Image (tube, helix red, strand yellow):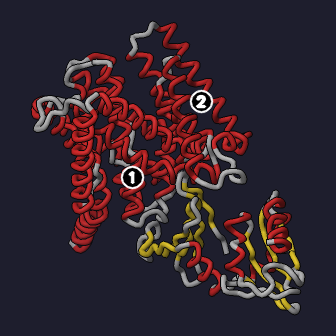
Amino acid sequence: MDIAATFLELGAVLFTLGLLGHCATIVGISPIPFYLLGGLAFGHGGLFPLGASEEFIEVGAEIGVVLLLLTLGLEYTAQELIDGLRRQAPTGALDLTLNALPGVAAAFLLGWGPLAAVVLGGVTAISSSGIIAKVLTDLGRVGNRETPVVLSVLVLEDLAMAVYLPILTALLAHQTLAQGSVTLLVALAALVCVLVLALRYGRQVSRLVHNPNADPNSEILLLRLMGLALLVAGAAQQVRVSAAVGAFLVGIAVSGPVAEGAREVLTPLRDLFAAVFFVFFGLQTEPSEIPPVFLPALLLALAGVATKVFTGWWAARKAGIGTMGRYRAGAALVARGEFSIVIAGLAVVADVEPKLGAFAACYVLIMAIVGPLAARVVEPIVRKITRRSRRKTVTSLSA
Amino acid sequence: MDVEETTLPGIGLRHDFRTRSGRRVGVVSHHGGRRELVIYDTDDMDTCSESIPLTAEESDALAELLGAPHIVERLNNLGKAFAGIVGEQIKITPGSPYDGQPLGETHARTRTGASIVAVVRDQQVIASPRPDFGFVAGDVVVVVGTPENTAAVAELFRVG
């Protein structure tokens, strides 16, 4: 490996991403679409194709996926996952079917076959909890009464990921039905075990990565947790369950104050490697493939906005939230991002369909921009519509 | 008064209630200890028109202004309310390394995990003493935490 060339390229990539992220903050949107565009520019057929650092970026991207899923697992405690499943199961079922549908339909309309349909269904179904959490905080809506509804939908999507990813991995590896069901059973059994472990022995499990009395500094926590996550991810990959699911389970198992501390020490690391992951995904996509798939992706995005808004609206109505809150909940859920790319990334590596990568990239580009925007403009739009309809009632009454 | 408690998965807890004057106020407690004071809109009761982020210190100060003395009353029932948490009274003996030292110097919270919630001096309860509160021998310090943590505070006051 040519160290000088690798450093120069990697430095240029990261610095450019930093500048792009800066632009995103100024405009007030998520940096994810910018990172994807950055990846496109550095990829084959892009403006500045990379050479020496590709190998590092590939491994870095895999670590990025592990970190994304690990921090996702840390986000919610086992108790929160179980409670969500118990109370909001119908909402979760509606969310997943309604939002997977456009992706599945798109795959068949494009003539891509059932495997691509499973992939695209996942890409369109899963919201970006990262973008949504940021938007809710930025807009000061954390205390809003519809926010628990939004969060519980995200919790259930989380759980669904733990079931969906092993299925997808099994399908992508072209396993036979028997092999596939074994993989799935292993994954499900692991999920149940981890949930039970975390509920009953959460404190002991957390001791595995951190002993608050013995090591006061966070670097030991970082090393132990990262080591454990990679070990489990590696083992999961070995038995073909998917490294991402392994990391996610580690995240769930660690709970309490340790999880809080872990999230703090992992966040900068995750941001770095997640950015590398987005670049890697962009690298694998030829920019020239984007224009032909842009229109279908835009149509799919429109469908995706409609289905998510309806999901949020329905869930909020069920929770007794007023009209404006229902639309706010719907609009908040629109953003898709990191996890859609994780799913699409698995399919790209397995070479499911040549244009799938570009299509998914395009879709996420649109949705990561539209999502936060939708959350911002929903209130004025709904107010305008209700005022107009009220005026109509008034005129019809006076007539 | 009906205080509603809602879990916010991944964020923490929200408590809110309706005041007699018809406004809705609440507090969002983030997992990391950060608080947010939220005041709901009068037209759209689901949205908060104001949300004020408070650091741990600021929320302590606000709580004190709003009537922290109640805390001491509740301390007596604490053992029943939360399993595993105890309230301990620790007397500062003459010769303790913190006799004459301000509370802040003990760094009790960071070093032991237990919190000093009140000090009893001459039969008077000083609730939520500030970091510049100076200890004198004879003070009784009320600490709350797990049994191990409160024991560590006792040790701290004895030998430093």
Under circle 2, the secondary element is helix
Q: Could you say which quadrant of the image residue B146 lies in?
A: bottom right
Q: How far apart are the alpha carbons under marks 2 and 1? A: 25 Å
Q: Secondary structure at mark 1?
A: helix
Using a 10 Å C-alpha cutoff, classify the residue at mark 1 as few (fewer than 14 neighbours), some (14 to 19) or many (20 or more): many
Residue type at mark 2 is Leu
Look at mark 1 in the image and give the residue it sits on.
A132
Residue A116 is left or right of residue A216, and the answer is left
The quarter holding residue B129 reads bottom right
Viewer can see residue B127:
yes
If you read the primary sequence from the N terminus, does the residue marked by circle 2 or circle 1 appear first? 1
User: Residue B81 placed where, x, y %?
Assistant: 81, 64
Quadrant where the N terminus of chain A sits is top left
Which residue is at the front of the view, A52 or A87? A52
- Say which residue label 2 marks: A191
Label 2 crowd (10 A; few <14 / some 14-19 / many >=20): many
Inspect the image, locate mark 1, and give the three-letter code of the amino acid beneath it.
Ile
